[in-house]
């Protein structure tokens, strides 16, 4: 467990602006390139959130990630408006699977702007919905509020999970280390008891001749 907390402490030791910049950039890339390329935005956010140890840090990361997610969604939306359904036949969408593009489109047809909000919590599909929304000519004035609401809720949820995971890892390691010392002590006691019992048993079953030889 020590390697885990060492990694978390190393990450926490980085300048906070650097952590925020990398996290924001990956979030922006994941949403902007929603036509198919998946940057590890969610994984990066969870990892970066382990450095959140105070309310001010939470609020700053929440703001940065939310803004980057909305900006990425908006760029993805305009890519969809610009290229339309031609994106479905693009190389990146084919690589991801055109069924995900179709699923995003079906979700938008059934739920409208609400699909933008709910898709934020759906892997793969969330990267395609902004572009699909633009291609489907969903009005931007309806798209933007849903994008903001989804980004704010999604980022708060993942930052909270990451922060709790970081704190839990340190707690678990402290408990684990204590348990290890107890187990090691028990192992030594058990080994001594087993050794003494075998020695006593061997002495009890020894023949008189063997006893004389030992003596």
Image (cartoon, grey):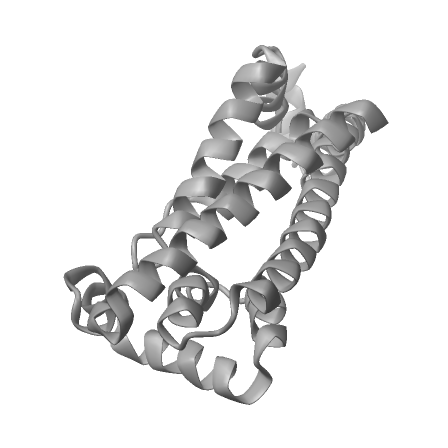
- Percent of width and height locating residue 65: 60, 38
Question: What residue is rendered at 42% in x and 74% in y?
Answer: 137
> Is 164 in front, or is 126?
126
Residue plotted at (38% across, 64% down): 131
Vertical placement of 114 versus 25: above or below? below
Measuring from the top left, give residue 40's x and y in whole percent: 42, 44
Judged left or right of residue 156, residue 28 is left
Q: Say whether residue 153 is left or right of residue 141.
A: right
Is residue 196 in sight in this rendering? no
Residue at point 30% right, 59% down? 36
Q: Considering only vertical position in the picture, is 208 above or below 89?
A: above
Inspect this view and state whether residue 103 appears: yes
In front: 114, or 207? 114
Q: Quadrant of the N terminus?
A: top right
Q: On the rendered structure, is 145 left or right of 76?
A: right
Q: Relative to the observer, which residue lies in front, 199 or 19?
A: 19
Residue 73, given in percent of the width and then of the height, sits at 48, 53
Q: Residue at the right extreme?
A: 55
Q: Quadrant of the C terminus?
A: top right
Q: Which quadrant of the figure has residue 212?
A: top right
Query: Where in the figure is residue 23, as x and y percent of width and height?
Result: 52, 32
**Which residue is painted at 57% across and 25% down in the image?**
20
């Amino acid at each position: 467990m020590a390697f885990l907390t060492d990694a978390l402490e190393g990450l926490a030791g980085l300048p906070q602006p650097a952590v925020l910049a990398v996290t924001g950039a990956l979030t922006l890339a994941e949403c902007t390139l929603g036509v198919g390329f998946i940057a590890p935005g969610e994984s990066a956010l969870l990892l970066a959130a382990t450095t959140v140890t105070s309310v001010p840090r939470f609020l700053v990361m929440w703001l940065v990630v939310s803004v980057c997610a909305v900006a990425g969604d908006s760029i993805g939306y305009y890519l969809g408006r610009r290229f339309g359904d031609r994106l479905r036949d693009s190389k990146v969408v084919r690589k991801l699977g055109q069924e995900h593009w179709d699923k995003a489109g079906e979700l938008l047809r059934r739920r409208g702007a609400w699909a933008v909000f709910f898709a934020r919590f759906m892997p793969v599909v969330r990267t395609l919905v902004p572009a699909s929304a633009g291609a489907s000519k969903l009005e931007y004035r309806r798209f933007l509020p849903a994008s903001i609401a989804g980004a704010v809720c999604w980022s708060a949820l993942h930052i909270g999970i990451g922060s709790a995971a970081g704190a839990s890892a340190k707690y678990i390691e402290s408990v684990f280390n204590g348990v290890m010392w107890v187990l090691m002590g028990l192992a030594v006691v058990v080994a001594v008891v087993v050794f003494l019992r075998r020695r006593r048993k061997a002495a009890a079953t020894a023949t008189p001749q063997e006893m004389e030889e030992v003596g």
